[in-house]
Amino acid sequence: MMASPPAGAPAPEPAPEFDFVLFGATGDLARRKLLPALFDAHAAGSLHPRGRILALGSQPLSHDAYLAMLNDEVLPALAGNAAAAAWQGFLDRIVYLQVDANADAGFGALAELVNARAAPVVVFYLATAPHLFVTICEQLARVGLTGPRSRIVLEKPLGHDLASSEAINAEVARHFAEDQIYRIDHYLGKESVQNLMAVRFGNVLFEPLWRREWVRQVQITIAEELGVERRGNFYDGIGALRDMVQNHLLQLLCMVAMEPPTSLSEDAIRDEKLKILKALRPIRPEDVAEKVVRGQYSRGAAGGDPVPGYASEPGIAPDSRTETFVAIRAEIANWRWAGVPFYLRTGKRMQSRVAEIVIHFHDVPYPLFPHPLGIMSGNRLVITLQPEESIRLYFLTKQPGDTQALIPASLDLQLNTAAPRVRRVGAYERLLLDVIRGRLGLFVRRDEQVQAWRWVAPILKTWENSPTPPKPYTAGTWGPAASSALLSRDGMAWHEEM
Ligand code: BG6
């Protein structure tokens, strides 16, 4: 068990006074993630008392009607009585403003509001469709809101492919310097991902083993039980490779595989991640069929109830070939990782919601001890991001009693049980506070994003030109059989199949 943090541990620095300008304030992301995250930060006392939230939407809502909508749709999802007590104070921070990205009028009013206060930090969060990013930046520049105190947060997907993402990046860069641009990937804000860095680089134990000589394979899974929900129109033009692999999965892979950074400064970390993205062995079009599995869920069950197949979901074309599942066998061409397979997998409507990184170490060279299951060592480090956050180290130990047999055991390396009462900071909450405090380390730099698009490009292209549709898998399973075959060809199995 780990000890509690020392009493003298530094308190988090207070956030400066800010205006948080939220484009897309009536949208799904704002209601489900961003406003609850800002609320949590407010309730925890992490926001400056004069920090304001300017909620912008294209709908002609009165301020009171907007707050009523938050009462109905955001408050019920927040936890318990403590939330209710802090709620009014949170609403007092909010001002609703109707702003249509394509109309000048709203931006004039926005500038007046922002300039009247002159807060030292102004955050523009673009929780809108990406085709509006450039127009919004131009409008902000037109009304003089792109100065040094401004920061812009860009939600993914930033573009559709390398060319379109670079076109957006180039336009945004005309108005904002790179250190004003926060490309958000909320997986980087998850506690276990942060703790992975701490476990790797805060101890001497793992680093010598963290390489091809000792690691046999790495698995990174983000499985969702939900289907496409109400996002059909949006998702059908995107698919799992763009929605999850190009960003979340590749960022997690970087966190596992990168070299120790020279410091915790933002560019030291991002430089190391970039090296990994550059070292990813390209998947050539002729290798796509062998190294990549794409699937689409068909009718099945979720949580015990029957659910429709993807092509029958609202907003989806009945002949859609959009993938809802991807599995990839990736390799990193450098001295540390050459020859170690990195299996990446993500899917909607899978058997359960789980996000985890599993580092499988090699077996012992020779089995000295009898083991009923025939496992030679089973050493693995499992970093679970969802549904609960944990880091566990699995190993074999002696079965108690008059026997030499070994049994599997595990060590909890996270503070879950040691510090049960310490409040967990959610991914969006952490990242939004980072934006307000001006910390870029957990945001994706432009060159990283370019490199990630470059790596997925041949896969996208090959699928586009391929006559073969995605492989169907029954909703509520672990994906197409080809996904298991991807590993069994190497003599491996997915973690849950072991
Ligand atoms: C988003 C994707 O980035 O991540 C969604 O666009 C996905 O399709 C979501 O559902 C998953 O995030 P989390 O944190 O709920 O696993």
Image: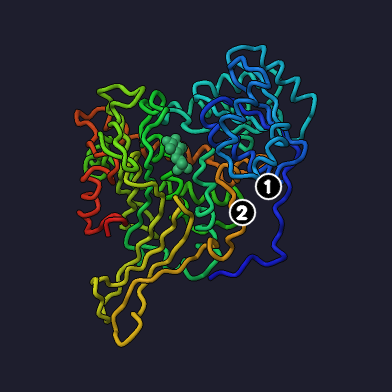
Q: Which quarter of the picture shows residue 8?
A: bottom right
Q: Is residue 428 visible?
A: yes
Q: Which quarter of the picture shows residue 105?
A: top right
Query: Which comes sooner in the sequence, label 1 or label 2?
Result: 1
On the image, the x and y values in percent for residue 70 come to 61, 29
- Please name the amino acid that badge 1 sits on: Ala
Viewer-proximal residue among 348 and 147 = 348
On the image, the x and y values in percent for residue 427 come to 55, 45
Q: Which residue is mark 1?
A: 44
Discs 1, 2 touching: Cβ within 8 Å: yes
Viewer-proximal residue among 107 and 422 = 422
The image shows residue 374, relative to residue 416, as above or below, that is below
Q: Is residue 452 left or right of residue 414?
A: left
Counting other residues with Cα less than 10 Å from the Cα at mark 1, is it few (<14), some (14-19), or many (20 or more)? few
Q: Secondary structure at mark 1?
A: loop
Q: Which residue is mark 2?
A: 423
Cα distance in 3D space between marks 1 and 2: 9 Å
The image shows residue 185, relative to residue 308, as above or below, that is below
Viewer-proximal residue among 409 and 366 = 409
